[in-house]
Amino acid sequence: MKFTKKLLIFSVLFITSLSFACAKDTEKKTNDKVKEKSNYLVTFVELGSVKCIPCKKMQPIMEAIEKEYKGQVNVVFHDVWTSKGKPFAKKFKIRLIPTQVFLDKEGKEYFRHEGFFPKEDLVKILKQKGIK
């Protein structure tokens, strides 16, 4: 009986530590992706979900920004309702979705918006960092 309890406790601790390691690894890979793109003037991070209605309305805007400002703006999307995206909700300390986070060339946040963000207003934020 005591052996079974010890084995159960060990298993729970092992699985917990493994899940933390995986979450950190996922975060590191995405952080590396953002840092690799340092030649971009702005990284536009969209935190939302493919199942959220306001988030769905942001999809065509993100695609347009990516197309129109190719080479200047790095567009990154994280579905925070998935296990892969959940660590980014924590990292960016989001309160609701969608949330847009804008990072400058050095990777520092310079602007944040919560909710649907019309393209015209979004472009004004991009132009603050010299996007043409």
Image: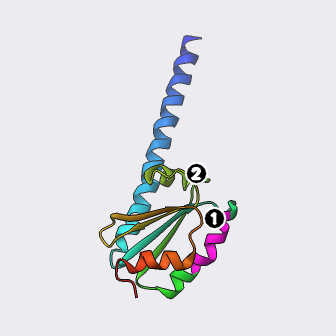
* Three-letter residue code for mark 2: Ser
Which residue does the numbered mark 2 point to in the structure image?
Answer: 83
Alpha carbon separation for disc pair 1 and 2: 18 Å
Q: In the rendered structure, which segment of residues is drawn in magenta?
A: 54-63
Q: Local crowd at mark 2 within 10 Å, few (<14), some, or many (≥20)?
A: few
* SS assignment for the magenta stretch, majority: helix
Q: Is residue 114 magenta?
A: no
Which residue does the numbered mark 1 point to in the structure image?
Answer: 55
State whether residue 45 is above or below residue 8.
below
Q: Is residue 62 magenta?
A: yes
Q: Position of residue 27 (x, y in %)?
A: 43, 55
Sooner in the amino-acid sequence: mark 1 or mark 2:
1
Under circle 2, the secondary element is loop
Q: Local crowd at mark 1 within 10 Å, few (<14), some, or many (≥20)?
A: many
- Is residue 82 found left or right of 42 in the rendered image? right
The quarter of the image holding the N terminus is top right
